[in-house]
Image (cartoon, grey):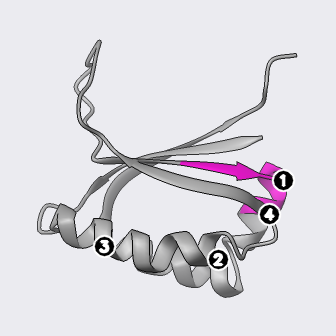
């Protein structure tokens, strides 16, 4: 299962500073969560079929399952990361996906 996070930064946030923070702080800590099997993030560089919503970044997180991931993000290290992340982020959506078999 994967969780795809689409998000935009707050108006006063500087993208280059966010990139450094996520590389130095988010990536190494996310992989420590029991529910996270893989983590990578991307900077959005373009849109096709634009519907008016703009995102600055996307995270693709390989997870064990949605329930465990949500649990990890509600306590301990996961909550710490989420709290810091919310200081940067203005708007976001998380989409949980399973492989089509």
Does the residue at mark 2 contact the one at mark 3 (Cβ under 8 Å)? no
Residue 46 in the image: x percent, y percent?
Answer: 23, 29
Residue 50 in the image: x percent, y percent?
Answer: 25, 18
First of labels 2, 3 by sequence position: 3
The residue beneath circle 2 is 78
Q: Which residues are magenta?
A: 60-69
Instruction: Work out how far the residue at label 1 is from the one at label 4, CA to CA, in angstroms.
Output: 5 Å
First of labels 2, 4 by sequence position: 4
The residue beneath circle 4 is 35
Please tell me whether residue 62 belongs to the stretch shown in magenta.
yes
Element type where label 4 sits in the image: loop
* Number of the label disc, if any, that sits on residue 64: 1
Q: Who's the residue at 34% across and 52% down the image? A: 91
Mark nearer the viewer, 2 or 3: 3
Q: Who's the residue at 53% across and 69% down the image? A: 27
Q: Quadrant of residue 39?
A: bottom right
């Amino acid at each position: 299962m994967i969780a795809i996070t689409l998000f935009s930064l707050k108006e006063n946030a500087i993208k280059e500073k966010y990139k450094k923070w996520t590389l130095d702080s988010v990536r190494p800590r996310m992989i420590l969560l029991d529910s996270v099997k893989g983590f990578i993030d991307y900077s959005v560089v373009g849109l096709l079929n634009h519907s008016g919503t703009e995102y600055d970044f996307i995270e693709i997180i390989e997870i064990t399952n949605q329930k465990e991931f949500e649990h990890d993000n509600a306590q301990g290290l996961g909550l710490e990361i989420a709290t810091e992340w919310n200081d940067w982020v203005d708007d976001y959506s998380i989409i949980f996906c399973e492989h089509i078999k």
